[in-house]
Amino acid sequence: MLTIFLQAAPGGSSSPMMLIMMGVMFVGFYFLMIRPQMKKQKQEKTFQETLKVGSRVVLTSGLHGRIAQIQDDGFVIETLSGKLKFEKAAVSREFTDARFGEKAAKAAEKTADKKEIETEKK
C-alpha cells in the first residue's frame, strides 16, 4: 500500500500539473455555477425595481395579487382577502412571468403607447 502512494506522487504534492488542474476546476465552477447565479440575482433585482403600482404578481409562496403600494422595504399586495405587506424578495420573477407573462407584456405595451400618444399631443 505504501508503494502505491510513493509512485503516485513522484515530484512532491505541489506539481505544476496539479496547480493547473485546480485552476481549470475553479474556472469551470465559476462559469457553470457562480456566474449564472449572479446573473439570475441581477435579473430578479431589476424585475423587483421595475414593478409598479397595479402590476399583477405571484409571490414565492404562490399567492397571487396586485401591487397596491410600493414602500422602501416591501410591497403592499392587494388580494381577494384584503391587503397584505410582503418583502420585495417575496415576489418571484419566474412565477409572475409564467402566470402573467403575455398579459403583463401587453399591458406594458398599452401603457407605453398611451404615453407616446400623450407626449405627441403636447
Image (cartoon, helix red, strand yellow):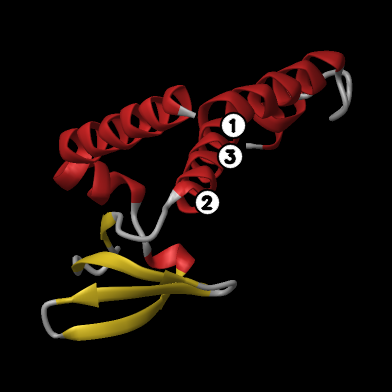
- Locate residue 47: give its quadrant: top left
Mark 3 vs mark 2: which is more N-terminal? 3
Q: Is residue 101 left or right of residue 3?
A: left
In this view, the mark in front (3 or 2):
2
Q: The N terminus appears in which quarter of the rendering?
A: top right
Q: CA distance from mark 3 to mark 2?
A: 17 Å
Q: Amino acid at mark 2?
A: Glu
Residue at left 44%, top 22%? 120
| 24 relative to 13 in the view: left or right | left
Residue at 25% x, 69% y: name it.
Answer: 61
How far apart marks 2 and 1 lie (CA) works out to: 21 Å
Q: Amino acid at mark 3?
A: Met
* Circles 3, 1 touching at the beta carbon (< 8 Å): yes
Circle 2 is placed at which residue position? 49
Q: CA distance from mark 3 to mark 1?
A: 5 Å
Say which of 114 and 46 sits in front.
114
Q: Are marks 2 and 1 in contact (CB under 8 Å)?
A: no
- Tell me the SS state at disc 3: helix
Per the image, the residue denoted by label 1 is 35
Q: Position of residue 77 (x, y in %)?
A: 31, 73
Residue 117 found in image quarter: top left
Q: Which residue is mark 3?
A: 38
Furthest residue in direction front, as rendered? 122
Residue 95 position, x and y percent, is 24, 50
Image location of residue 5, percent across then percent down: 70, 32
